[in-house]
Each structure stands twice: as structure tokens, then as C-alpha cells.
């Protein structure tokens, strides 16, 4: 009997390495595929590419930007998504002050300052412990993707739609998971998603920030395994 497919969508400027602990832990219970989120400058088209690359039916998990794209996938093709996990993400439109910050960051990336931006501004906010050795991994993922992907992803996040109606209409097994020390996507975003989803478990990971998949893989893996069998 074939294993179910789990499509994993990484965060902004992250790649499959963000999910390495989950791919290993779930290899006996799911066939994991990591989506690519760098090919378009709007969330709708990124989601269309995820759907083109995915099988007819699949479980879907996304973290941060990956969660935002996952919600759009569920909006476009809810009949294809068998279950949904949203981790350290945000169902709301981009706030005006964040849009303005992204414009400044886009200018910096175009000026050749992507590595400085990653090291000094972005990655220190990803982890509960900013001095963690995982910091370098996060920087390297961003540098691998490069400035063009950074600019496209920034533009996509600026113009994303509100997904609260999508979540309220998605009546399949769902997981909302967050690192308790996540400053980028605070608890109010997650409580909103939990209140909207008809079938949902809410898991908070202690001593983790924005990327619990790497910071606290054992706790994250346990939550994902439980969600996969709901």
C-alpha cells in the first residue's frame, strides 16, 4: 500500500533543509515533497505552481510564508487537500508598516546587500536563541535562493489576500502549531486560525521561535505525526 503524500511548503528564503528533521521522521508514514515558492511575485501564482507539482490528493503543511501559500492552495483547490497544517504563519493581509519595511529591504537586496540583510535583520528573528548554530543554516538557505527570489517573495507577501473565509470553509483535519517565542507571527494570528477552523488541534512548542521545525524537531515531529493520523 502506497504512503500518503505530504507536501511541505518552506518559509521565506528557506528550502528543503528547513524540513530535514520532518522528512526523516515521517519517511515511514508519508512521501514528503517540498514545494518551491520562488517562481512568482504573487501568492496566487505560487499556489498554482504548487498544485501543478502535487498529486491529485495530498496532505499539506506550511510554515510562515509556506503557511500563507498553503492557505491559498486550500482556497484554490480545497477538494485536493486532505488535511492542512499551518505553522508560525498569518491568515491576515500585510500590515502597512510591514509593507513599507519590505520596500526598504527590496532596495537593499537590489543593491547587493542580501547577506547583510539576512544576517543582521531577518535571521536573528527566526530563532528563540539568536546565537544558535542554526543561524548559519538559515543564512545559507537564503543565500542559495538569492536576491531575485527574495524580491519576488517580498512582493508576493505584500499583496497577499486575507484567508479567514478560506479557513472557516475548510472542514478537514487541521493542525495549528507555533513556537511560543515566535515574534514574527505572534499568538493572536494562531488563535484567530484556531477559532476559524472547524477541525483543529493547537500545539504550542516551548523554547522555540519562528522555525520550530529546526529548533524543536522532536516536538514538531510528534505533532505532525498525530495530525497525519487524525
Image: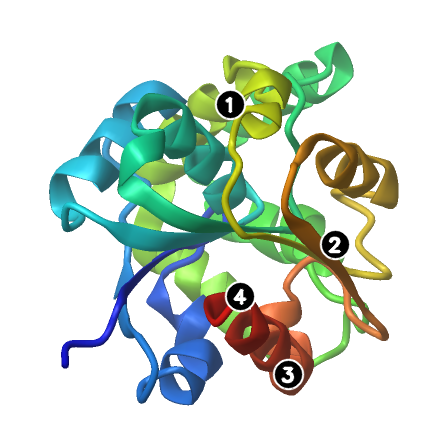
- Residue at image position (35%, 66%) is 16
Between the residue at mark 1 and the residue at mark 4, the CA separation in whole angstroms equals: 45 Å
Q: Which residue is mark 1?
A: 107
- Residue at image position (32%, 85%) is 27
- Mark 3 and mark 2 lie on one chain; the one further toward the N terminus is 2
Q: Which residue is mark 3?
A: 133
Q: Which mark is residue 125?
A: 2
- Mark 3 and mark 1 lie on one chain; the one further toward the N terminus is 1
Q: Secondary structure at mark 3?
A: loop
User: Toward the viewer: 146 or 156?
Assistant: 156
Which colour style is shown?
rainbow
Asked which quadrant contains residue 214, the reply is bottom right
Asked which quadrant contains residue 136, the reply is bottom right
- Mark 1 and mark 4 lie on one chain; the one further toward the N terminus is 1
Q: Which residue is mark 4?
A: 230
Marks 1, 4: nearer the viewer? 4
- Residue at image position (36%, 31%) is 78
Q: Position of residue 142 (x, y in %)?
A: 43, 55
- Residue at image position (39%, 82%) is 26
User: Toward the viewer: 168 or 132?
Assistant: 168
Q: Position of residue 63 (x, y in %)?
A: 54, 52
Q: Secondary structure at mark 2?
A: helix
Between the residue at mark 2 and the residue at mark 1, the CA separation in whole angstroms equals: 20 Å
Q: Is residue 107 visible?
A: yes
Marks 3, 4: nearer the viewer? 4
Q: Is residue 39 left or right of residue 127?
A: left
Q: Residues within 10 Å of mark 3 (few under 14, many from 20)?
A: few
Amino acid at each position: 500500500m502506497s504512503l500518503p503524500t505530504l507536501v511541505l511548503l518552506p518559509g521565506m528564503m528557506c528550502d528543503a533543509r528547513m524540513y530535514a528533521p520532518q522528512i526523516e521522521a515521517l519517511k515511514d508514514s508519508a512521501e514528503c515533497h517540498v514545494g518551491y515558492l520562488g517562481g512568482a511575485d504573487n501568492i496566487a501564482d505560487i499556489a498554482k505552481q504548487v498544485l501543478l507539482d502535487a498529486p491529485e490528493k495530498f496532505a499539506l503543511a506550511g510554515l510562515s510564508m509556506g503557511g500563507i501559500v498553503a492557505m491559498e492552495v486550500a482556497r484554490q483547490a480545497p477538494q485536493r487537500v486532505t488535511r492542512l497544517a499551518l505553522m508560525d504563519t498569518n491568515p491576515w493581509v500585510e500590515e502597512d508598516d510591514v509593507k513599507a519595511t519590505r520596500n526598504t529591504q527590496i532596495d537593499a537586496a537590489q543593491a547587493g546587500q542580501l547577506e547583510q540583510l539576512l544576517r543582521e535583520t531577518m535571521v536573528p528573528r527566526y530563532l528563540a536563541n539568536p546565537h544558535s548554530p542554526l543561524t548559519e543554516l538559515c543564512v545559507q538557505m537564503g543565500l542559495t535562493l538569492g536576491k531575485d527570489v527574495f524580491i519576488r517573495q517580498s512582493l508576493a507577501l505584500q499583496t497577499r489576500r486575507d484567508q479567514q473565509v478560506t479557513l472557516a470553509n475548510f472542514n478537514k483535519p487541521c493542525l495549528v502549531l507555533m513556537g511560543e517565542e515566535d515574534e514574527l507571527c505572534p499568538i493572536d494570528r494562531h488563535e484567530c486560525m484556531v477559532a476559524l477552523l472547524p477541525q483543529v488541534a493547537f500545539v504550542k512548542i516551548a523554547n522555540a521561535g519562528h522555525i520550530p521545525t529546526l529548533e524543536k524537531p522532536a516536538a514538531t515531529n510528534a505533532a505532525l505525526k498525530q495530525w497525519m493520523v487524525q
